[in-house]
Each structure stands twice: as structure tokens, then as C-alpha cells.
Amino acid sequence: MLHDDESGEVKQWDLIICRDNQTTSLKDYTYTISNTASSKTLQEMIQMDRQRYWIERSFQDNKNEVAMDEYQVRKYRGFYHHMSLCMLATLFLMEERMDCKDTLPLLSCADIRRAMEFLMPKKVTNLEEFCVQMEVRHIKRQKSIDHASRDAIPH
């Protein structure tokens, strides 16, 4: 039982302690505090706790493989556009994993991204092309800097 100082209510919380049956090491224990309804059985609460891993795994894949955490926007519309694209990319990755689950059961989102990088045609095939592309990027970058500098000067 825990006492909430703000509301003055006493709430019941459950402490779930689990360990892997394969080991007896203390570091293999997991601890979870739960405020689930008392109608849940211990087995149901443990199952809910174990499902948390897959949720965390999904967020980690989204951050690492589809750049969910790399948005740089100033307005909600840009944020929603970024998140929508991340969701579409995640859908693609999940569908690929499901399509390959029989032949490649351990296929990860990172594996799919690396395969795409390998299989996609490369724009640059030699040093000369690389230098030309870099020069084009520098010209565009300078135009952007000049435009921003012009707008920053009061008229």
C-alpha cells in the first residue's frame, strides 16, 4: 500500500519480482511496481511485465533504424510529418521481417537497413563523381547561407 500525499488516498500497488529459471544470480532478477487492477492474476501480471521488452525493443529499433528521435522541426505539422514517415518505415521493416520469418527468423531491422544500403544503387562510383557532388552541395549550402544572412539584416 502506498499513500498519495496530494490526494490523501491510499492505493494498492504490487511488486513483481521475477528471475530467469536458468540462473540464481541476483542480477538476473527483474523488479516491477504495478498498479494493475487486483482482478489480474499473478500470471497475467507477469505476462504484461514481460511484454514490456518488446515495446522497448520497438522504440529502440525506431530510434536507431528509422531516425524517430532525429526530428528537427519547429512546428507540430513538421513533427507529425516526421513521425508519420517513421511509422511507414517501421511498417515496411515489420512486414519484411514477417515475410522472412520462416527463412530468416533472427532477421532484425538493422539487418534490413544494411541490406538495403548494400543493394541500393550508389550515386557515387568514383572519386571524381564524389567531388562533383560535394561541390554541388557546397554551392547549395552557400546559397542557403546567403539567403539566411540577407533575411537577418534589417531593411
Image (cartoon, grey):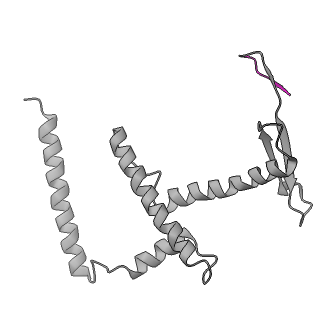
Query: Toward which corner of the image does residue 13 lie, by quadrant?
Result: top right
Residue 48 counted in the magenta span: no
Work out which quarter of the rendered image holds the N terminus and state it.
Answer: top right
**Image quarter hosting the C terminus:** top left
Residue 3 is inside the magenta segment? yes
Across and down, in percent, residue 52 comes to 69, 52
Between 7 and 26, the residue placed more toward the observer is 7
Q: Residue at x 86, y 61 (%)?
A: 20
Question: Is 104 on the left-hand or right-hand side of 48?
Answer: left
Pick the front one: 129 or 104: 104
Q: Main secondary structure of the magenta part?
A: loop
Residue at the image position 51 percent from the left and 70 percent from the top = 95
The image shows residue 76, relative to residue 45, as above or below, that is above
Q: Position of residue 153 (x, y in %)?
A: 12, 33
- Residue 72 visible, this orientation: no
Observer-nearest residue: 116 or 24? Answer: 116
- Observer-nearest residue: 43 or 6? 43
- Would residue 85 be seen by someone viewing this image from the given angle? yes
Q: Which residues are magenta?
A: 1-6
Q: Is residue 110 above or below residue 18?
A: below
The percent position of residue 119, horizontal first and vertical second, equals: 40, 82
User: Which residue does the image show at 48% across and 61% down from the upper left?
Assistant: 90
Count of numbered badges drawn on the protein: 0
Q: Residue at x 59, y 75 (%)?
A: 107
63 lies left or right of 36 = left
Q: Is residue 45 left or right of residue 52?
A: right
